[in-house]
Amino acid sequence: MEGRYSLVERARALLADEQGTLYKEAPYRVALCYPSPYHVGMSSLGYQAIYGEVHAHPGATAERVFLPDDVEAYRRTRTPLFSLETQSPAADFHLLAFSVAYELELTGLFSMLELARIPLLTEERTARHPLIVAGGPLTFSNPDPLEPFVDVLVQGEAEDLIHVLLDAAQSMDKEALLTHLARVPGFRVPGRGGTRYHVAKATDGRLPARSAIVTPHTELRSMFLIEPERGCSRGCHYCVMRRTTNGGMRTVPPERVLSLIPDYAKRVGLVGAAVTDHPRIVELLRTLVDAGREVGVSSLRADRLTQELVDQLRRGGATNLTVAADGASQRMRDLVDRKHSEEQIIRAAHFAKTAGMRQLKVYNVVGLPLEEDADVDELARFTTELSRIMPVALGVAPFVAKRNTPLDGAPFAGIREVEARLERLRRGLKGRAEVRPTSARWAWVEYMLAQCGPESGLAALDAWKDGGSFAAFKKAFQARGCQPYMARRVEDGRRRAVTWPIVDGVAPPSAA
């Protein structure tokens, strides 16, 4: 049986393998919390960027806290949740700041608060408890399910807002702080106001976000992450990072990117919503590879690939080429304004083969509104064609409508329907490509949290207490009366806009 000592020793072993860990004494202590395990959290560029920003603040310091790999070991040994850097109890910090990437991480937040011995519901906490704040990628779409559990929501890009928060938190008591923040754009204080669905924009001087720490114990082993660009200039209807969200794409000159990469970083990850749209991406890749570094890129657009770009990726250590099609057929890609054609994806496969790569990975979605069996059949036909060029792995996710997009409020296709389309796809492929599907059941849970309000967060709490199974979520959503509704559907923006279906009979709420 694992004891407390071994849990602490495991944390110290992780620390020993890190490069760039920050230590600082300061009067205001922040626990930066990630509601997934260490290997996931340390792959998050946003989380690492805020770690650096807190340490840059003159009056504050930050330590990291992650969801344990083995939550039961903490419960069994009655070990309070502790920070990585000094193994201090999380409850002893002034502020617990959670970075939440997507809806299904909500249960991780519950487990962390429970292990920290902090009441989960805001209404059950007192002035003696730490301030509980949440931000992260989820706030670009729908942070409503977080409302019952946090004192403050930080919405959008947080590099500037974290300094506003820390300045105020050190000079005000909790009541005055919450009243003040409710009046500051970018903050939402449940029960007190703040602009709903606001997405803050960091000043250009804060860019680029980059890793503070490099560690071998991540999804992206020993990789230094940095963004050569932020945002996206495209208009894909399903995406919360589309051009209307935060003013499109902002690029960082390669010279600045290169100047911020430490000498010890032998592997570099270029991260962003549209990295290959950067006008000087090939030049940046070539410079990194010529310096003897391995390089990875997070978002490859098939229409931007060239043989030279793919060759540089191969020189940088890549063995697979990954592109996203995001539409079962050309008809569906055109409807969602995904600017890719079959010809461009086929060309990408030829680039990968010529460069000597082993596999082409293609991400796709099924279950978009207006999709038909014929679209799935076209996906099978096209994937078969790709497989004649090189081995193909097809990642297929059920479509989940997100707030703040033209597809906001679109219904979920249905669990049975999605599973039937996946089976139809497998039959059509006849084993010619590997199919890696995302669970239709958990996509529906994600959809409910993405499209419902604070009551869905309470339902998630009920389900977590009931064991966290799919059946528990289904029961809890029903008991809490959770019903998807259209919150804020942004304009399509095209001359011949698509009129997407919405959930019938549910009126949109006020945007205030």
Image (tube, rainbow, N blue to C red):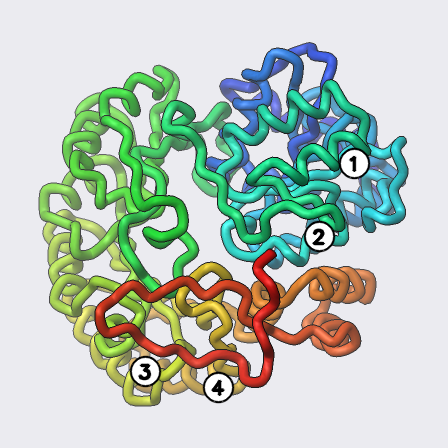
Residue in the picture at 28% in, 21% down? 256
Counting residues from the N terminus, which is met first, the one under dot 4 or under dot 3? 3
Q: On the image, numbered disc 4 is attached to which residue?
A: 417
Name the element at disc 3.
Answer: helix
- Disc 3 marks a residue whose amino acid type is Val
Depth check, mark 2 against mark 4: the one in front is: 2
Label 3: how many Cα within 10 Å (few below 14, some 14–19, many 20+): many
Task: Quadrant for residue 170, please give it.
Answer: top right
Q: Which mark is residue 81?
A: 1
Name the element at disc 1.
Answer: loop
Counting residues from the N terminus, which is met first, the one under dot 4 or under dot 1? 1
Say above or below: 436 vs 158: below
Q: Position of residue 57 (x, y in %)?
A: 58, 16
Q: On the image, numbered disc 2 is attached to which residue?
A: 147
> How far apart in space, not on screen, are marks 3 and 1 (Cα)?
47 Å
Q: Position of residue 315 (x, y in %)?
A: 19, 36
Name the element at disc 4.
Answer: helix
Q: Position of residue 314 (x, y in %)?
A: 20, 42
Whether pointer 2 and pointer 4 mark residues with C-beta atoms closer than 8 Å, the reply is no
> How far apart in space, not on screen, are marks 4 and 1 (Cα)?
42 Å
Between residue 106 and residue 493, name the one nearer to us: 493
- Disc 1 marks a residue whose amino acid type is Leu
Say above or below: 12 vs 182: above
> How far apart in space, not on screen, are marks 1 and 2 (Cα)?
22 Å
Q: How many marks?
A: 4
Q: Which mark is residue 376?
A: 3
> How far apart in space, not on screen, are marks 4 and 3 (Cα)?
12 Å
Whether residue 442 can be seen here:
no
> How far apart in space, not on screen, are marks 2 and 4 (Cα)?
32 Å
Depth check, mark 2 against mark 3: the one in front is: 2
Depth check, mark 1 against mark 2: the one in front is: 2
Task: Quadrant for residue 90, please give it.
Answer: top right
